[in-house]
Amino acid sequence: AQSVSQHNHHVILSEAASLELGCNYSYGGTVNLFWYVQYPGQHLQLLLKYFSGDPLVKGIKGFEAEFIKSKFSFNLRKPSVQWSDTAEYFCAVNVGKLIFGAGTRLAVHP
Amino acid sequence: DTGVSQDPRHKITKRGQNVTFRCDPISEHNRLYWYRQTLGQGPEFLTYFQNEAQLEKSRLLSDRFSAERPKGSFSTLEIQRTEQGDSAMYLCASSLNEDQPQHFGDGTRLSIL
């Protein structure tokens, strides 16, 4: 069965620290991969997407993700986080519908 | 704002009652999805529509749940004889087609007393 695994459930960082959130998926076909973000009190918003081509994709607010097909991974990165990045982050694979990971709650302290 | 709209935002009801939620997708979007999210989990797929046709239902969707999209525009999700385990956030999303990103609404939070 298709599944998405996010390795970190809670991450606490200080401002300016670097961020990497792990995501692994289980699906044998061609994948479309997404990272969504949910800021406190807001709806899920698309952060970035991978459909094909360059495996390094850039999203909004300085986030990027790298698709590594051999590792079935799509890790999210940001070189320097800000307090405003405090949110919950969800990795998802599109198999006609979205299969989400359990999410990673990120807290950034000033 | 012409994003995905859901109504109501919150619903509190007694166990055994029926509830109905509404979702208005982005106007030109053909696909409409329903998901359920509980605390500490990512959204779980329930069902989706291509225009007015319901194409897939998750096994999570018991026979107490029914969804419609009668004219290929707005959709309703009804839960009959609600149970404690139905307490969750119900999310609606829409997309232009199956490959394009899904846009989410704010959700309807259901609490069963």
Image: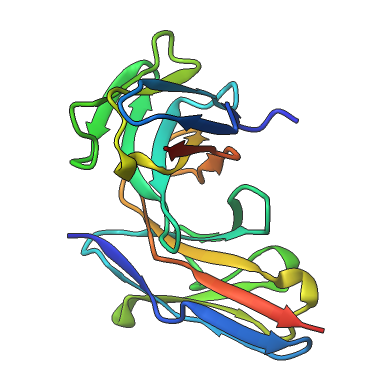
Q: x, y (%) of residue B97?
A: 44, 34
Left/right placement of residue A14 relative to residue B65 reads right
Residue at the image point whose x is 36% and y is 20% from the top: B18
Q: x, y (%) of residue B36?
A: 39, 44
Left/right placement of residue A64 relative to residue A7 reads right
Residue A97 visible in the snapshot:
no
Is the residue B37 above or below the residue A12 in the image?
A: above
Residue B25 visible in the snapshot:
yes
Residue at the image point whose x is 60% and y is 80% from the top: A77
Q: Residue furthest right?
A: A110
- What colouring style does the render use? rainbow
Q: x, y (%) of residue A96?
A: 32, 44
Quadrant in the picture for residue A89 = bottom right
Quadrant in the picture for residue A30 = bottom left
Is the residue B15 above or below the residue A35 in the image?
A: above
Q: On the rendered image, what quadrant is the N terminus of chain B found in?
A: top right
Q: On the rendered image, what quadrant is the C terminus of chain B found in?
A: top left
Q: x, y (%) of residue A12?
A: 63, 85
